[in-house]
């Protein structure tokens, strides 16, 4: 079968397309014909710097894939050939709090990912694709979709009428925008691009802020909320934006920290004084994924795909991710 491998340092230019023997599912496993794989910032970081992460190479990148089951191993009862499925980011996190064992089962990091024609996944490490979604749409959900759900619903306990601040218009932020609008929340979106902000408004964003023309965007958020601050923030920037996010959050609000896109340092004083709940979020469990899928099935919600690439174009998809000009998700179609 055809796969892409990280074989060593060298970044995107060193990403190798090669062949591996066709895998076979063992007991409790399923063989999935991968039809699409989406790219996350985490996948780009892994490709660009695998050595410092201490990864076992060669490694197939990418956590997010969707396809159909073609063979099941001994003892498998949850799936049959022909089922349309998505892999879970963590193969061994079904429910409850995350554990070290679960973290050691992350696709495209601790273990081989899904940028390949076929992948062997655990019986408990796949979920059904909502009927209304294509393989490409489904492939956007395992990381970005579950992360957005975990931030807003699991951690933030979002309610209709809440105000949510979303930084940027990448995969997690756009999915969070869609979920927040679906749930009746008021959304504020930041970006450096007026065109992207216009697209965010088309998706239901109530307010938008261009942080290049308004670098004190946290003050703009406070103005919009009458000085009160937002109920929660999906924080993708990291240390470089965290203090502004805390300033823009109400007393006893929630900041879900999922990204490290910017450098800088953090002064924890405001977190303490405002009794902010600062929660690190690393994707989510299979149960959260199933809850997300149920909500999407009921609402008919479809993820936003900026661009789809062919399998031969996978390196270009990573370069597009690095250029950060996309809105929503980037997907590689396989086969």
Image: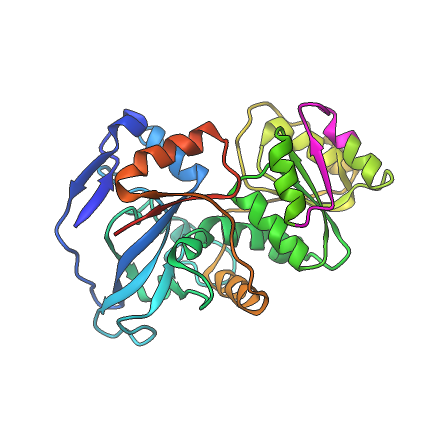
Q: Is residue 49 in view?
A: no
In the shown orientation, is residue 209 left or right of residue 103?
A: right
- For the point 82% across and 41% down, the residue is 225
Quadrant assignment, res 27: bottom left
From the viewer's perspective, is residue 244 above or below residue 283?
above
Magenta span includes 215: yes
- For the point 55% across and 24% down, the residue is 263
Quadrant assignment, res 223: top right
In the shown orientation, is residue 140 left or right of residue 61?
A: right
Expressed as whole percent of the image width and height from the top left, the position of residue 299 reads: 59, 66
Q: How many marks?
A: 0
Q: Nearer the viewer, residue 98 or 178?
A: 178
Expressed as whole percent of the image width and height from the top left, the position of residue 32 reads: 27, 61
Expressed as whole percent of the image width and height from the top left, the position of residue 190 reads: 66, 35
From the viewer's perspective, is residue 83 above or below residue 221?
below
- Residue furthest out toward the left: 21
- For the point 82% across and 39% down, the residue is 224
In the shown orientation, is residue 42 left or right of residue 239?
A: left
According to the image, what is the colour scheme of the structure? rainbow
In the shown orientation, is residue 258 left or right of residue 319?
A: right
Q: Nearer the viewer, residue 186 or 269?
A: 186
Expressed as whole percent of the image width and height from the top left, the position of residue 328 reads: 52, 43
- For the point 81% across and 36% down, the residue is 222
Quadrant assignment, res 121: bottom left
Q: Which residues are magenta?
A: 204-219
Magenta span includes 23: no
Q: Is residue 322 in view?
A: yes
């Amino acid at each position: 079968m055809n796969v892409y491998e990280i074989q060593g340092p060298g970044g995107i230019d060193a990403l190798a397309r090669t062949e591996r023997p066709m895998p076979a599912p063992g007991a409790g496993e399923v063989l999935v014909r991968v039809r699409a794989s989406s790219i996350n910032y985490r996948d780009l970081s892994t490709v660009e710097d695998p050595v410092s992460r201490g990864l076992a190479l060669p490694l197939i990148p990418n956590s997010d894939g969707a396809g159909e089951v073609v063979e099941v191993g001994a003892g498998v009862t949850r799936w049959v050939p022909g089922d349309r499925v998505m892999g879970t980011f963590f193969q061994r996190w079904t429910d409850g709090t995350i554990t070290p064992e679960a973290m050691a089962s992350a696709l495209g990091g601790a273990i081989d990912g899904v940028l390949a024609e076929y992948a062997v996944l655990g019986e408990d490490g796949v979920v059904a694709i909502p009927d209304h979604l294509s393989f490409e749409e489904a492939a956007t959900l395992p990381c970005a979709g579950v992360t957005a759900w975990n931030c807003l619903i699991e951690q933030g306990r979002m309610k209709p009428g809440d105000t949510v601040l979303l930084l940027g218009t990448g995969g997690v932020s756009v999915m969070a925008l869609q979920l927040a609008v679906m749930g009746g929340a008021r959304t504020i979106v930041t970006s450096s691009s007026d065109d992207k902000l216009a697209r965010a408004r088309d998706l239901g964003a109530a307010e938008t802020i261009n942080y290049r023309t308004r670098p004190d965007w946290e003050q703009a958020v406070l103005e919009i909320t009458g000085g009160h601050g937002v109920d929660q923030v999906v924080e993708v920037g990291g240390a470089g934006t965290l203090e502004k996010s805390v300033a823009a959050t109400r007393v006893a609000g929630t900041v879900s920290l999922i990204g490290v896109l910017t450098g800088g340092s953090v002064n924890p004083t405001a977190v303490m004084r405002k009794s902010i709940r600062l929660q690190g979020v690393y994707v989510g469990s299979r149960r959260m994924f199933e809850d997300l899928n149920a909500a999407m099935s009921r609402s008919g919600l479809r993820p936003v795909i900026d661009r789809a690439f062919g399998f031969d174009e996978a390196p270009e998809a990573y370069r597009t991710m690095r250029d950060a000009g996309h809105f929503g998700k980037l997907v590689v179609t396989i086969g």
